[in-house]
Amino acid sequence: MENFQEKISVQNERALLVGAVLKNTYTDNLAELVALVESAGAKVVDRIQQKIHKPHPATYVGSGKAKHIGERAKANKADVVIFDNDLSPGQIRELEEIIGTKVIDRSELILDIFASRARTKQAKLQVALAQLEYTYPRLTRMWSHLDTVTGAAASGGVGTRGTGEQQLEIDRRLVSKRTTELKKELASIDARKMREIDARGGLFKICIVGYTNAGKSTLMNALTDADVYVENRLFATLDTRTKQWILEGSKKVLLSDTVGFVRNLPHQLVASFKATLEEAVNADLLLHVVDVSSSDAHDQAENAKKVLEEIGCKDKTTLVLLNKADAVAKDSQLELLQTIYPDAICISAKTGMNLDLLKAKTLEIYQGGLATLRITVNAADGKIQNYLESATEIIARNFGDNTVVLDVRLGKNQIAELQRFKPTKVEEIDIY
């Protein structure tokens, strides 16, 4: 069967953008939608913003405005009209009938971008599941390729990748069956991933989070040898990578990169990417990267915080990093952000600016303050003695017949790690 995805190049999609907002909250919120559309590979040919008192139940913007959008779409030869709002399946159908061209909403666009970025089996399954759960009521035109949904990385028209486009009636039982199959496959992968996380034992875990394109992958590369793919577009990275980061001497932590967030990230994606986001949930410290060169830096930071709250990270220890501080056009904007986030560190992941301060602050949090301990170990136990030599400051050492007693300083957070070596005796002292 000929694949519809091979017939249409994403670069040929001409998109008309529509943003409808309540009158008392009117803002120019299409800038992010433009970035999302361009990230999807389409070309923005026109944009329309509409103030509304409340969403129209049938068309969201009203039939008169819908007809106007249709005229503008025809005049600009638009292939797709993209709303910066979440539309119901009924509204989609009504709008397509009036406008005379394909209509998708913000969430479906984001799902489509994720589909084009998915590379690993886990990412493809996660995107496929999210697409089915969100879009299956409107998949009539896409049904024929549902059985190849996990091949979503292939290119296709905006809003069509991953499911094909054929005018066939949806068989809800088959959709339900496919959803169940995807969930089972993901459950198996998720369980393995959780075992991998648990296997890291007492190692201190740090997760880089933040708005998409804030510079998380660049920071990951700057701090480790991760060689994470970096590109100046939204959602360039979907898959989590974890690498060791050496803070000082032999003090090593695990550093993970995560998928970026956006305003109103579809709940289906948050749910489907649960295992990927578990890196943040299980982290001991979050590095929240904020792109201060963006005019919407504060809003982006707050939206990222909302997503973190959704996945259970509200009370997680977090260090805010004001990234791209070397590229800020207005000093007043950076000063404002520093006022809002007084404990933040201004950095540039690209140039390396203040990464030494980031490492020092991270080491401070990692240690959790210093403790002075007297530790008694078996004289023949070389493993624990090697650990103490490399991971602590040894103040005094006394030898007995079969034991060694060491007075050391180490981070309070590392006491649990020390116990893994099963010392004979550990007591806190304050004589130094």
Image (spheres, rainbow, N blue to C red):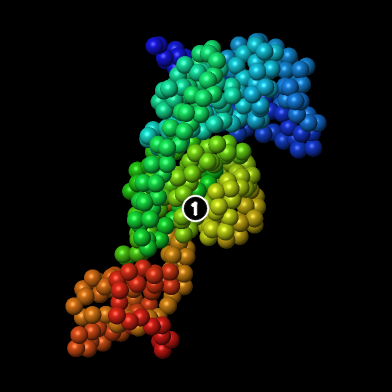
x then y, percent, for residue 194? 40, 50
x then y, percent, for residue 113? 50, 29
Evaluate whether residue 329 shows in this view: no
Splitting the image into 4 quarters, where does residue 23 fall?
top right
In the figure, is residue 3 to the left or right of 378? right
Residue sitting nearer the eye, 92 or 392: 92
Residue sitting nearer the eye, 35 or 57: 57
In the displayed structure, would residue 111 be above or below residue 45? below
In the figure, is residue 158 to the left or right of 103? left
| Disc 1 residue crowd, few under 14, some 14–19, many 20+, Cα 10 Å | some
Mark count? 1
x then y, percent, for residue 130? 51, 33
Q: Amino acid at mark 1?
A: Val
x then y, percent, for residue 27? 72, 35
Residue drawn at x 29%, y 80% is 424
Quadrant where the image shows the N terminus: top left
In the displayed structure, would residue 381 be above or below residue 30? below
Helix, strand or loop at disc 1? helix
Residue drawn at x 67%, y 13% is 97
Residue drawn at x 42%, y 37% is 184
Quadrant where the image shows the C terminus: bottom left
Residue that numbered label 1 is attached to: 281
Residue sitting nearer the eye, 249 or 203: 203
Evaluate whether residue 363 shows in this view: yes
Splitting the image into 4 quarters, where does residue 159 fall?
top right
Residue drawn at x 46%, y 56% is 283
In the figure, is residue 60 to the left or right of 429? right
Residue sitting nearer the eye, 167 or 84: 167
Q: Residue furthest front?
A: 173
